[in-house]
C-alpha cells in the first residue's frame, strides 16, 4: 500500500541532486590543493627568501655525450693527519773491515809552529809590553812566515829546579842554594815546581807540587848539610840535563828548566854534541841557566901556575850554559855577588810569565824531520827596524828572546 504522504516528486528530486552533489565534490578537490600551496604570511616573515634554483648542471648537452663531466665537482679538503709520511731514506751502506783488521781512521796533521818571544830592555831586563802583531816578523830558514795567531801570555808556570850539589866547594853550593831560594820566593800559588840535584848521579828531592813550602824545606835541609855533604865531587851535568828533559817531555804544555850549576862536566856518558842536539830538538821547553862560578872565577882569574887551564875550564862551562839557554829561548846569568841574585831571579820569573806567543803555519809543510832555523825581528808601522826610547827621548836597546830553531816532525810520528 502506498504511503499517502510520499509523492512521486520527492523521488524525482533525489535522483536529480545526487549527480550535482558529486560534481561539487569533484570541484572542491582542486580548490583545496590550491589553498595548500598558498604561502603563509607568517612564515614569510620568519624565514629568509630562498635563492632561485640554479639550472640543472647535470642535464645532458644538446649534442649528447655523458652528462657527469659538465657539473660542479666538489673536491674534499685534505686533512694534514691523513697525509702519508715520506718514504724513509735508504740505510747507509755498511763496510766491514777484513778479518783481523781494526778500525782505520784518516788523520791529516797540518803543521803549526808556536814561538814564544820575550822582548827585554838590555839595561834593566824589563819586559816590553804593548807590542802589536804587526811589530813582529818571523823567518824560517830565511823565508818570512805569515803569523796567524798572536797573544800576550802570562800564566802559571811548570818549572824544574835542576841544581848542582856536589863536593866541589862550599862557595859553589851556597851560591846554588841562594839562587834556588830566591826563585822560590817569587813563585805563585798556581805554579808547579820540582827540585832535582845532581853530582855523579841525579836525585829527585821534591817531585812536582804546588806546595812551595816543600821546596823551601828541601833547600833548607841541603843548606844544613852543605858544610859536610855526603856527595861526590864529580858532576855529570850532561846526563842530568838529558834525564830532566826526558821527564819533562811527559808533561804537556810549556815547561821551564832553571839550571843552577857551574856547568863543568867531568864524567857524563853523553858528549856535548849529543846533549846539544837533544836540547835543540826539545819542544815546549825553555832553559834558564845561572852559573855559580862567578865569584870564584873573579877571585882566581890569572892567579897561580895553573890559572890558564882553570880559566879555560870556567870559560868552557860558561859557554855551554849560555848555549843551553839561548838555543831554547831562555837566558843565561852569571852573578858575582849574592846581592845580584834577587834581580836576576826576578827577571827570570818575569820573563817566564810575560811573553808574546806567535803561531804560524810554515810555508815548508814537509814533515821530514829537518832542523829549521828561526829568526824574529821587530819592525815599526812602516816596516823599518823598531826603535825604542825612554821618557827623555834617549834610545833604548832591547833583546829579543826566542828559540833559534826547531826540528820538524817526522811523518811516522
Image: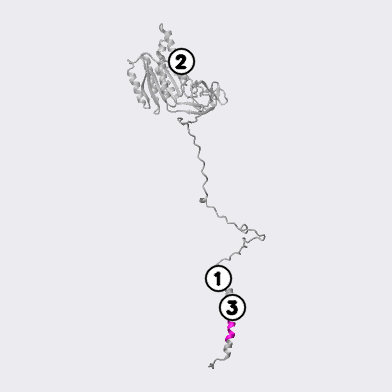
Quadrant of res 202: top left
Label 2 sits on a secondary structure element that is helix
| Viewer-proximal residue among 336 and 240 | 240
Which mark is nearer the camera, 3 or 1?
Answer: 3
Q: Going from the N terminus, do you reach mark 2 or mark 3 first?
A: 3
How far apart, in angstroms, are the residues tagged by discs 2 and 3?
Answer: 145 Å
Please name the residue that numbered disc 3 is placed on: 26
Magenta-drawn stretch, dominant element (helix, strand or loop) = helix
Q: Which residue is mark 2?
A: 273
Viewer-proximal residue among 248 and 37: 37
Instruction: Choose the circle earlier in sequence order: 1 or 2.
Output: 1
Q: Estimate the x, y position of residue 267 in percent, counting from the top left.
A: 39, 13
Q: Does the stretch in magenta take in 129? A: no
Residue 340 appears in the picture as rendered:
no
Judged from the image, the secondary structure of the residue bearing numbered disc 1 is helix
- Residue at the spot of label 1: 42
Q: CA distance from mark 3 to mark 1?
A: 31 Å
Q: Is residue 86 left or right of residue 333?
A: right
- Give the magenta-colored segment's residue range: 14-28
Category of crowding for the residue at label 1, using alpha-carbon neighbours closer than 10 angstroms: few (below 14), some (14–19), many (at least 20): few
Badge 2: residue crowd in 10 Å (few <14, some 14–19, many ≥20): few
**Horizontal relation, residue 54 to residue 339: left or right:** right
Amino acid at each position: 500500500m502506498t504511503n499517502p504522504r510520499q509523492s512521486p516528486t520527492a523521488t524525482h528530486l533525489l535522483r536529480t541532486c545526487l549527480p550535482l552533489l558529486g560534481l561539487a565534490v569533484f570541484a572542491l578537490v582542486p580548490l583545496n590543493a590550491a589553498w595548500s600551496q598558498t604561502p603563509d604570511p607568517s612564515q614569510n616573515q620568519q624565514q629568509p627568501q630562498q635563492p632561485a634554483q640554479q639550472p640543472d648542471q647535470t642535464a645532458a648537452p644538446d649534442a649528447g655525450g655523458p652528462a657527469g663531466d659538465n657539473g660542479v665537482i666538489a673536491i674534499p679538503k685534505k686533512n694534514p693527519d691523513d697525509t702519508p709520511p715520506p718514504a724513509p731514506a735508504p740505510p747507509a751502506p755498511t763496510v766491514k773491515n777484513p778479518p783481523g783488521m781494526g778500525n782505520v781512521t784518516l788523520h791529516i796533521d797540518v803543521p803549526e809552529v808556536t814561538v814564544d818571544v820575550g822582548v827585554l830592555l838590555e839595561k834593566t831586563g824589563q819586559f816590553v809590553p804593548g807590542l802589536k802583531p804587526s811589530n813582529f816578523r818571523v823567518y824560517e830558514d830565511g823565508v818570512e812566515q805569515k803569523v796567524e795567531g798572536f797573544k800576550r801570555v802570562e800564566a802559571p808556570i811548570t818549572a824544574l829546579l835542576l841544581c848542582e850539589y856536589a863536593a866541589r866547594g862550599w862557595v859553589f853550593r851556597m851560591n846554588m842554594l841562594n839562587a834556588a831560594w830566591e826563585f822560590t820566593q817569587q813563585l805563585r800559588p798556581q805554579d808547579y815546581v820540582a827540585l832535582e840535584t845532581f853530582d855523579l848521579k841525579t836525585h829527585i828531592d821534591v817531585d812536582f807540587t804546588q806546595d812551595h813550602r816543600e821546596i823551601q824545606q828541601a833547600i833548607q835541609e841541603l843548606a844544613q848539610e852543605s858544610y859536610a855533604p855526603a856527595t861526590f865531587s864529580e858532576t855529570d851535568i850532561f846526563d842530568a840535563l838529558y834525564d830532566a828533559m826526558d821527564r819533562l817531555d811527559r808533561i804537556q804544555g810549556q815547561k821551564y828548566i832553571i839550571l843552577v850549576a857551574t856547568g863543568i862536566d867531568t864524567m857524563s856518558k853523553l858528549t856535548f854534541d849529543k846533549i846539544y842536539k837533544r836540547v835543540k830538538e826539545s819542544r815546549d821547553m825553555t832553559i834558564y841557566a845561572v852559573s855559580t862560578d862567578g865569584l870564584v872565577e873573579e877571585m882566581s882569574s890569572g892567579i897561580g901556575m895553573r890559572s890558564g887551564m882553570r880559566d879555560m875550564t870556567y870559560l868552557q862551562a860558561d859557554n855551554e850554559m849560555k848555549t843551553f839557554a839561548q838555543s831554547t829561548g831562555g837566558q843565561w846569568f852569571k852573578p858575582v855577588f849574592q846581592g845580584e841574585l834577587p834581580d836576576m831571579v826576578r827577571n827570570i820569573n818575569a820573563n817566564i810569565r810575560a811573553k808574546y806567543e806567535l803561531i804560524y803555519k810554515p810555508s815548508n809543510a814537509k814533515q821530514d824531520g829537518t832542523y829549521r832555523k828561526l829568526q824574529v825581528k821587530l819592525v815599526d808601522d812602516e816596516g823599518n827596524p823598531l826603535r825604542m826610547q825612554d821618557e827623555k827621548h834617549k834610545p833604548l836597546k832591547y833583546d829579543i828572546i826566542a828559540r833559534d830553531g826547531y826540528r820538524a816532525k817526522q811523518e811516522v810520528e
